[in-house]
Image: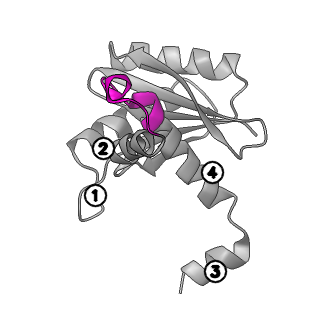
Amino acid sequence: MRFLAIDPGEKNIGLALSDPTGTIASPLMVLKHSSRSEDAAAILDIAQKNEVQQIIVGQALDEDGQPSFEGRKAARLAGAIRARTSLPVILWDESESTQTARAAQIHMETPRRKRRGHLDELAAVVILQTYLDQLNKPSNETDKNSN
């Protein structure tokens, strides 16, 4: 099963795609944000071309676990996507995805000049990989974590 993750931003939208087994997330591309409707159409076109079966939209939550201002915008984008497709569209907590992507670049010793700019597609990878890891976690591990 192939998944597409979205890191919606004010200017850019990062996209990540899973491998066909739904195990590993990889960066796909960055779209320039235009309008919610046009963004939804472009995302669905990309999903169709990549034979995606599920779309994951990163949603920022505040310290109380409620959608932040950006999180509410992400929910509206998810709604616009849902209105155009029968594919499942899931909202997923994207807290700290950009910071995690930046830390990964530093850990991989990416030169500072190459770390400049947006991290949108890497943040989408973080969102998707955390979703896939949770989805693929053995049920006995899930049971242990729920205690």
Placement of 41 over or under 144, stated as above or below: above
- Asked if the residue at tag 2 contacts the one at tag 1, i.e. Cβ–Cβ closer than 8 Å, the answer is yes
Distance from label 3 to label 4 (Cα)? 17 Å
Q: Nearer the viewer, mark 1 or mark 4?
A: 4
73 or 99: which is nearer to us? 99
Which numbered disc, 3 or 4, marks the residue that appears first in the sequence? 4
Distance from label 1 to label 3 (Cα)? 25 Å
In magenta, the rendered stretch is: 109-123
Q: What is the quadrant of the N terminus in the image? A: top right
Where is residue 64 drawn, in percent x and y?
24, 65
Placement of 23 over or under 41, stated as above or below: below
Crowding at dot 1, Cα within 10 Å, few <14 / some 14-19 / many 20+, comes out as: few
Q: Is 60 on the left-hand or right-hand side of 121?
A: left
Which numbered disc, 3 or 2, marks the residue that appears first in the sequence? 2
Placement of 46 over or under 72, stated as above or below: above
7 or 87: which is nearer to us? 7
- Determine which of the numbered discs, if any, sits on residue 66 in the image: 1
Where is residue 109 drawn, in percent x and y?
44, 38
Which numbered disc, 1 or 4, marks the residue that appears first in the sequence? 1
* Residue beneath disc 4: 132
- Determine which of the numbered discs, if any, sits on residue 143 in the image: 3
Picture quadrant of residue 123? top left
Secondary element at tag 4: helix
Q: Is residue 117 magenta?
A: yes
Query: Residue at the location (71% across, 47% down)?
Result: 23
- The amino acid sitting under disc 4 is Leu
- The amino acid sitting under disc 1 is Gln
- Asked if the residue at tag 4 contacts the one at tag 1, i.e. Cβ–Cβ closer than 8 Å, the answer is no
